[in-house]
Image (cartoon, rainbow, N blue to C red):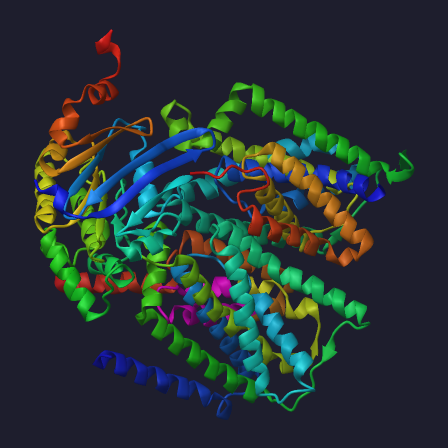
Amino acid sequence: MSATDYRNLAISAGLVGLVALMPFYASGYVMTLAVTVAMFTVLATSWALFSGPTHYISLATAAFYGLGAYITGLGIDHLPYWTLPLIAGVAGAIVAALVGVATLRLSGVYFVIFTLGLAELIRQLVTFAQVQAGRQGFYVLTSISETMIYWQLVALAAVVWLVGWLIWRSRLGFALRIIGNDETVARHSGINTAQAKVLLFMVPGAAAAIVGAIMAPRYVYIEPSMAFGPILSFQVVIMALLGGTRRLWGPIAGVIPFTLLWEVISGNMPNQTYLLLGVAFLLIVYVLPGGFVGLYEKALHRWREGRAA
Amino acid sequence: MATTMTRDVLSVRGLTKRFGGLVAVNGMSFDVREHEVMGIIGPNGSGKSTMINMISGALQPTAGTITLNGQQISGLPAYQINRRGVSRTFQLVRPLNELSVMENVVAGAAFGHRRRWGHEAEAFAETLLQKVGMGRHIHLPVASLTYIDTKRLELARVLASEPEVLLLDEWLAGLNPTELTTGIELIHSLRAEGRTIIVVEHVMDAIRSLCDRCVVMSSGAMIAEGTPAEVLADREVIRAYLGDEDDA
Amino acid sequence: MFIIITGLLLGGTYALIAMGLNLQYGVARIMNLANGEILVAGGLAAFWVYTAGQVSPILALFLVAPVAFAVNWLLYRIMLEPLVLRAKSRGALEVDSILATFGLSFIMIGIALMIYGGGYFNYSYLSTRVQIFDSSFALNRVVAFALAALIALALWLWLSFTRPGMTLRAVAVSPENARLVGIDVRRVSALAFALGGAITAMGGALISMFVTLDASTDGVIFTMKALIIVIMGGVGDIRGTVIAALLLGIAETAVGALISPGLTLAAAYVLFLLVLLFRPQGLFGRTTL
């Protein structure tokens, strides 16, 4: 590791520490927002780790998230609380690996549809199973406070960043960038493309499941249509792409403004959240193809050229 | 040339590829000896590209075997074949545009036959870039490279895994006369290093000056094998290239 | 028997919808994820003319088709063609068109919610029952099936035996070669996209005769079903599309009747999964080079 690496690590650790202290000075409403921001930070950052370099648009976030929430819901009365996020992480990684094996050797369109359907499939199956068992959902009653949820999410975000940073520097990360450029070249350069993609897809799978497990106590009552709501998947895609996937910090640059905007619009005009999603997608495609990171890089480039001239 | 004394690196036996009812390659058999440059030539549509695609693992043969140093590689996925030591360029050059010039070459070194990573890979990539004549372009964006430079870059990427057998798929195609001279010289220098190379080419001058031996394909089958001078004088080869009108 | 016929009746409309998507993806190379919203819009239009003016949904087809054609033509020209032109690779176009058409679908939902305020809509048209073999079926289902079959047949004849139909198929096979023989690929792509949209919207008008639609959630479900059919049947394969659609119709009806109506999409999805795992080139697809 170089000196810059140590410096960046130290700065990042300091920032995470500052953010972790928020519950001591922020109001209740701000903390509610902060939990949402922290949640989407984990989801969008881990999403971008896979979808950024490979250009495979995953809409499976809701499926993993719901899976995690249900693991907490089912296990809370039987297992110690701290085991639940771990179990969720393992389960999410396994499901992601299965989905990956089935779809990642095919083209991107198949993958999008498959992941989009996955949440819906699990939702229908869970609903069916619950109807058979004669219930609609169940209560998650714990003593876990919002502050504890927040700290867990911030810690998870730090882990995701660290993992992302390590992957970025590793041969696996490099292999994925080659795959994203030209999969044929990757294959003919000795890269087991299917394996690399499946391995990396397990990261967002595990992360989203853990987030679901951590967030479950916040809902109190868990039912399928809420835990597996497809909008979550779309929000994550928009936030990550709006921020930009070429840098590790890119997604959070999309998470913060979009979460705030979403809060305002869903609070005042709940029907118009669809329009917001639509406009955001078009904005990403037509105006900000590289996200805010792209804008930043362009500005940086211009500034450097200006100095060189 | 004392070709009889050197061993066979790559052997093809009865290799066949069918696409539905169409037989693209039909029962091809030949050997590639160590340190030799072997040409696969033939008119358009004679099955040369299919041949290269099968050797590199892009396509699976319908029948027949390919062995590398006595071990069967046919049927393996492309990445496995690359790791065993067969590395290829592409007919339509495929640079990795979002990566730097250096990374393009490291891409060849990091996962292939002889693996290098980190500083070692970068140092090796730099040597290769010098060798192919791109020493001055290391810091340019890939998208700004000229056509021949992208071809050079691809060659460096392929060399980076130190393959046992190098497959050059029409590497000289599309170059202008000056570039062509440079290109031929470059392949000459690789040959002088004792590499084993299979070239698929249309450029006859290149075949004459570069190849130790050639196999000539027509309609998926081999119609001649020998030194370039021998095969280019062969009546059947001339007929395959020029058509039958001359005989009438 | 009842299940099979009901399934076939449903599958007939599905076939029409999937043909629309198949035209858009196979010829214009755009994976249109707003396809389901176009369908819902077609259904809404039929609902609107029926409830407002007591105009038969069958007559509404003559309104829906040209309007959807024009709208989709404009969408292609304004929104999607720039993406085709700027795309550096097929993969880049795929990602762009997925994101752009998702955007489009959400905007269409937003507009529908703004105008109608709420989700569900249905109406009662030709709801008498007819006897087929020993079971009785709702007349609207039978009529919708017959019309879907008629439109699909017309499309097939047009594609197979007319000159414009042949240029469309030429572009589907290879845009590069089509360009070489003097076909204006951009114009043909726009035409195929518009035609595909018109067919999907007609499918929506037909399906609204017997299914309650929800403007905010049903679009994406129909998009998925159409996609599953296209992938099962093979891109650009009309015969495959029809068979896959009928299979899906039967599978859904069977699962709905025998296990639980809540699992119809799960049934479609399982079919999709099986195809992906065992026949990724489609049921009758040839492996391409």
Could you say which is closer to the camera, residue C55 or residue A187?
A187
Point out the stretch of residues depicted in magenta. Answer: A235-262
Q: Is residue B129 left or right of residue A186?
A: left
Prevailing SS of the magenta stretch: helix
Residue visible at 42% across and 56% down?
Answer: A55
Q: Position of residue B3 (x, y in %)?
A: 12, 42
Could you say which is closer to the camera, residue C244 or residue A145?
C244
Q: Is residue A101 above or below residue A20?
A: above
Residue B3 visible? The answer is yes
Residue visible at 63% across and 38% down?
Answer: C200
Report the number of numbered marks: 0
Residue B89 visible? The answer is no
Q: Give the quadrant of the C terminus of chain C.
A: top left
Q: Position of residue B234 (x, y in %)?
A: 17, 22
Could you say which is closer to the camera, residue C133 or residue B33?
B33
Q: Is residue A296 left or right of residue A112?
A: left
Q: Is residue B164 left or right of residue B230?
A: right
Q: Is residue A172 above or below residue C240?
A: below
Q: Residue furthest front?
A: B5
Is residue A239 located in the magenta-colored stretch of the structure?
A: yes
Q: Position of residue B199 (x, y in %)?
A: 20, 40
Is residue C271 located in the magenta-colored stretch of the structure?
A: no
Q: Give the quadrant of the N terminus of chain C.
A: top right
Residue visible at 50% across and 28% down?
Answer: C168
Q: Residue furthest bottom?
A: A24
Q: Position of residue A38 (x, y in %)?
A: 49, 78
Based on the displayed image, in which of its 4 quarters is residue A192 positioned? Answer: bottom left
Based on the displayed image, in which of its 4 quarters is residue C41 positioned? Answer: top right
Residue visible at 49% across and 37% down?
Answer: C28
